[in-house]
Protein backbone atom coordinates (compact mmCIF):
# COMPACT_ATOMS: atom_id res chain seq x y z
CA UNK A 1 0.00 0.00 0.00
CA UNK A 2 0.97 3.63 -0.36
CA UNK A 3 2.52 5.43 2.53
CA UNK A 4 1.41 8.99 3.25
CA UNK A 5 4.67 10.45 1.87
CA UNK A 6 4.32 8.44 -1.33
CA UNK A 7 0.68 9.48 -1.76
CA UNK A 8 1.57 13.13 -1.28
CA UNK A 9 4.34 12.85 -3.87
CA UNK A 10 2.08 11.18 -6.42
CA UNK A 11 -0.68 13.76 -5.95
CA UNK A 12 1.84 16.61 -6.21
CA UNK A 13 3.39 15.16 -9.37
CA UNK A 14 0.00 14.58 -10.99
CA UNK A 15 -1.13 18.12 -10.16
CA UNK A 16 2.01 19.68 -11.65
CA UNK A 17 1.73 17.37 -14.66
CA UNK A 18 -1.94 18.27 -15.20
CA UNK A 19 -1.19 22.00 -15.08
CA UNK A 20 1.68 21.52 -17.52
CA UNK A 21 -0.41 19.53 -19.97
CA UNK A 22 -3.22 22.06 -19.73
CA UNK A 23 -0.88 24.95 -20.47
CA UNK A 24 0.73 23.10 -23.36
CA UNK A 25 -2.66 22.24 -24.88
CA UNK A 26 -3.93 25.81 -24.47
CA UNK A 27 -0.73 27.11 -26.05
CA UNK A 28 -0.94 24.68 -28.95
CA UNK A 29 -4.57 25.60 -29.59
CA UNK A 30 -3.64 29.26 -29.44
CA UNK A 31 -0.78 28.79 -31.88
CA UNK A 32 -3.12 26.95 -34.25
CA UNK A 33 -5.60 29.84 -33.84
CA UNK A 34 -8.32 27.47 -32.67
CA UNK A 35 -8.84 29.66 -29.60
CA UNK A 36 -8.47 33.41 -29.25
CA UNK A 37 -4.98 33.92 -27.76
CA UNK A 38 -2.25 36.16 -29.02
CA UNK A 39 0.73 34.37 -30.53
CA UNK A 40 3.05 35.61 -27.77
CA UNK A 41 0.79 34.39 -24.95
CA UNK A 42 0.16 31.07 -26.73
CA UNK A 43 3.88 30.49 -27.26
CA UNK A 44 4.66 31.27 -23.62
CA UNK A 45 1.88 28.93 -22.42
CA UNK A 46 3.16 26.16 -24.68
CA UNK A 47 6.79 26.48 -23.57
CA UNK A 48 5.94 26.77 -19.86
CA UNK A 49 3.60 23.77 -20.12
CA UNK A 50 6.27 21.66 -21.75
CA UNK A 51 8.77 22.78 -19.12
CA UNK A 52 6.39 21.61 -16.36
CA UNK A 53 5.90 18.22 -18.01
CA UNK A 54 9.63 17.71 -18.58
CA UNK A 55 10.47 18.78 -15.03
CA UNK A 56 8.02 16.25 -13.59
CA UNK A 57 9.58 13.51 -15.70
CA UNK A 58 13.22 14.48 -15.17
CA UNK A 59 13.37 15.78 -11.60
CA UNK A 60 10.35 14.34 -9.78
CA UNK A 61 10.37 10.78 -11.12
CA UNK A 62 7.36 10.89 -13.43
CA UNK A 63 3.70 11.58 -12.82
CA UNK A 64 3.03 8.28 -11.04
Image (cartoon, grey):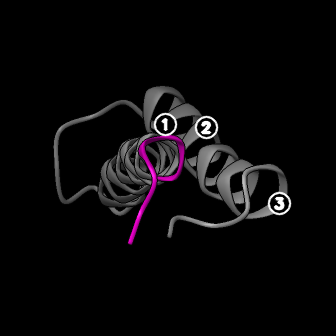
Asked if 10 appears above or below 61 in the picture, the reply is: above
Say which quarter of the image contains residue 42: top left
Verify whether residue 27 appears in magenta. Answer: no
Q: Secondary structure at mark 2?
A: helix
Please state which of residues 8 and 30 is positioned toward the viewer in this rendering: 8
User: Which tag, 1 or 3, sits closer to the chain's start?
Assistant: 1
Helix, strand or loop for disc 3:
helix
Q: Is residue 22 left or right of residue 63?
A: left
CA–CA distance in space, label 2 to label 3: 15 Å
Image mark for residue 48:
2
* Circle 3 residues within 10 Å: few <14, some 14–19, many ≥20: few
Q: Residue furthest left?
A: 35
Query: Dots 1 and 3: beta carbons under 8 Å?
Result: no
**What residue is at 60 percent from the left and 56 percent from the top?**
53
Return the residue nearer the eye: 16 or 44: 16
Question: What percent of the width, then of the height, locates residue 30?
Answer: 33, 49
Q: Which mark is residue 58?
A: 3
Q: Are marks 1 and 2 in contact (CB under 8 Å)?
A: yes
Tell me which segment is drawn in magenta.
1-6
Instruction: Indicate which disc residue 45 carries.
Output: 1
**24 or 41: which is nearer to us?**
24
Residue 23 position in % (x across, y down) = 40, 44
**Left or right relative to 59: residue 63:** left
Q: Residue at x 66, y 53 (%)?
A: 56
Q: Nearer the viewer, mark 1 or mark 3?
A: 3
* 24 in relation to 39, above or below: below
- Toward the right, the furthest residue is 58
Sooner in the amino-acid sequence: mark 2 or mark 3: 2
Amino acid sequence: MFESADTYGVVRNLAIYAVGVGLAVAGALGLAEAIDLSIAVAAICFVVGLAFVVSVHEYLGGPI
